[in-house]
Amino acid sequence: MISHKLVIDQLLSLFEFTDISYAVSTKPDNAMGSDESWNLATQALMNALKTMGKNFVIQEGEGAFYGPKIEVKIKDSMERQWQVSTVQVDFAQPKNFDISYIASGGAKQVPVMLHQANFGSLERFFGILLEHTKGHIPFWLAPIQIKVLPISDAQKEYAQTITAQLSAHGLRVELDESAEPLSAKIKVAQLARIPWMLVVGEKEMEAQTITLRYVSGKQEFGLTFEQILEKAKALQQI
């Protein structure tokens, strides 16, 4: 149980959700199973959260009919709260599938199943993430991580080399080969929420360097390819 919760905590932190709360949902009126089983399972969930030092609330009667659960809730950048991850106790499915095991005393026992939903609904989670970040999803997750922007055709070959080398290192990178001015290329990349733009002009080509422009507008000048690669790999280590 503790390892399940650690996985969920680590997962949510990757998506930069920091306002996380916890709840234990208890036995509803239409529940199956004995009070003894429910009390034992509910106490186990509460003890797991206490062991990890998590504050939580009790949601009376909000468990599923087949078992209590831990609910993990996140708050987005607009202060809206969403229930996402769950750890659900299930008394029903082991019986439905006739699952059993032999206990240490030699008797046949029916196990209790745990369902771990890390995201909840995957589609709903990513909808929440897109609204939370306003489309500026983390670098490691972005469909296109880097756009290479040559200022003119004279730098196109240099830009193609950079693009190919970054792609060879597993980064998702595109080259803007349009004839648009640099300002237009930057605007297109910003509207697409591409995290990084690599600008290469005559000065960069002569010095074999790159200007890194973030989607926020911040810039770093005179970086080598190795420095760019090191920065990118650091953000990939999730």
Image: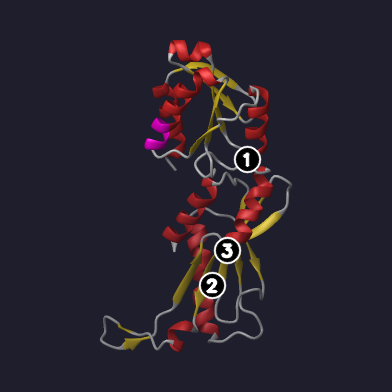
- Which residue: 43% across, 83% down? 94
In the figure, 231 relative to 48: above or below?
above
Viewer-side residue, 5 vs 214:
214
By secondary structure, the bulk of the magenta-drawn segment is best described as helix
- The answer to whether residue 206 is left or right of residue 85 is left
Give the crowd class for mark 3: few <14, some 14-19, many >=20 residues within 10 Å.
Answer: some
Residue 176, image x, y percentages: 56, 31
Amino acid type, residue under disc 2 in the picture: Thr
Q: Is residue 5 left or right of residue 168?
A: right
Residues under labels 2 and 3: Cα distance? 20 Å
Identify residue for label 3: 120
Residue at mark 1: 136
Q: Residue 50 placed where, x, y %? A: 51, 58
Range drawn in magenta: 164-168
Q: Earlier in the sequence, mark 2 or mark 3?
A: 2
Single out the mark in the foreground, 3 or 1.
1
